[in-house]
Amino acid sequence: MTETQRARATSSPRCLQDVAVGDAITPLVRGPMTPSHLMRWSAAIENWHRIHYDEPFATEHDGLPGLLVNGSWKQHVLTQMMREWLAPDGWLVRIQFSFRRMDLVGDTLTAWGTVTETQERDGLGFVTCEIGIENPRGENSTPGTATGVLPLRGGRPVPYPYPAG
Amino acid sequence: MAAHLTDEIRALVGQTGPRLTAAHPLGPDELRRFTQAVMDDDPIHWDADAGARYGGVVAPLLYPVNALRRPPGSADPLDRLHGDPDWDGTDLGSGLGGLPPVRVPGLPRVLNGGVEAEFHQMARVGDVISAQARYLDISERAGKSGPMVILTVETTYTNQDDAVLVRARSTVIMR
């Protein structure tokens, strides 16, 4: 394990018994988001939707308040937050979220999560979380849920690859 | 209420698109550019020892949804700006995994509604990723700003061994 991973692991649960309902997932803070960040993301995935990098188009043509942070980028931030919190012993089984509000250039965004349920099943520990991305206007732009799996204390490791079903 | 959903559009539910395969294996430079763009600095994305649990250097969990890009020799998508300066830069046809596009008169705006994904393994450097999409559902709803047509597309992403990496259900809102 590298030093970076060791530092992350200290804030991560190692087994289901380390987790309680109400626990916060280690948040990821990103920003302030600049046009450069959005341009780099659009170029990386070759998505040329102009509302993410062409400010006159976004504001004058589409009537938006500014350049919009890509939903396609936000989905990776939520997924990364959950994966890192569950690493190195757990696995993100499922994630779900909706794009409900606009996040804009200039925003600092906080991906957050809270444990809502824990459950033992098949010798493994399942953790369900409420997740979201908060913007400076106090909105949850991207509400959703996620389910991760951790070992039970002294139990079998989480299988990898993680099977379907 | 189903004013926008024609029989032709309904008939698309259950239809499966072509199996699309990335033009080349996932390379380390492509992965570095991607992970910096998404601001993911976990060494599992460049250090095989760090990624040992996952079999080596691996991509972010949701990477496969962005893996199918234009192959070499594709037409330049930005050429369209010359004849159509108001074009918004989107191309729904290419965004839905080769499925026949749904075109609904009177509902010109296309929004990314959300995603649900199940994860089985991470794509590794060297993997050749394929994707196959199908229309899971097409429905109409009355939204606050008028009628909306909601497409649910399920896409299964696999590697060169046909092992499932990710299964993702995307919601596309037309209004």
Image (tube, grey):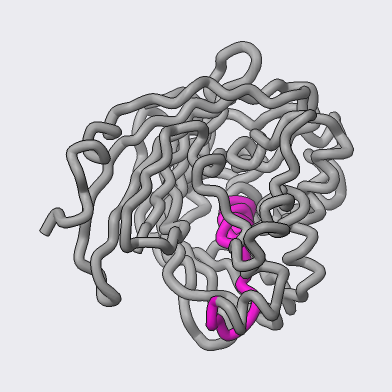
- Residue farthest to the front? B83
Q: Name the one closer to the observer, A50 or A147.
A: A50
Query: Does A54 appear above or below B131?
Result: below
Q: Name the one closer to the observer, A139 or B105.
A: B105
Please name the residue shown 59% across and 63% down the image: B88
| Residue B158 place in picture, x, y as percent | 57, 22
Q: Quadrant of the C terminus of chain B?
A: bottom left
Please name the residue shown 80% across and 31% down the image: B57
Q: Quadrant of the N terminus of chain B?
A: bottom left
Tag count: 0
Q: Residue A76 lies in magenta, yes or no?
A: yes
User: Magenta residues, as a range?
Assistant: A62-80
Q: Name the one closer to the observer, A146 or A66.
A: A66
Horizontal side of A65 relative to A39 (left or right) equals left
| Residue A107 place in picture, x, y as percent | 66, 81
- Residue farthest to the left? B1
Horizontal side of A69 relative to A151 (left or right) equals right
Horizontal side of B162 relative to B173 (left or right) equals right
Residue A108 can be seen in this image: no
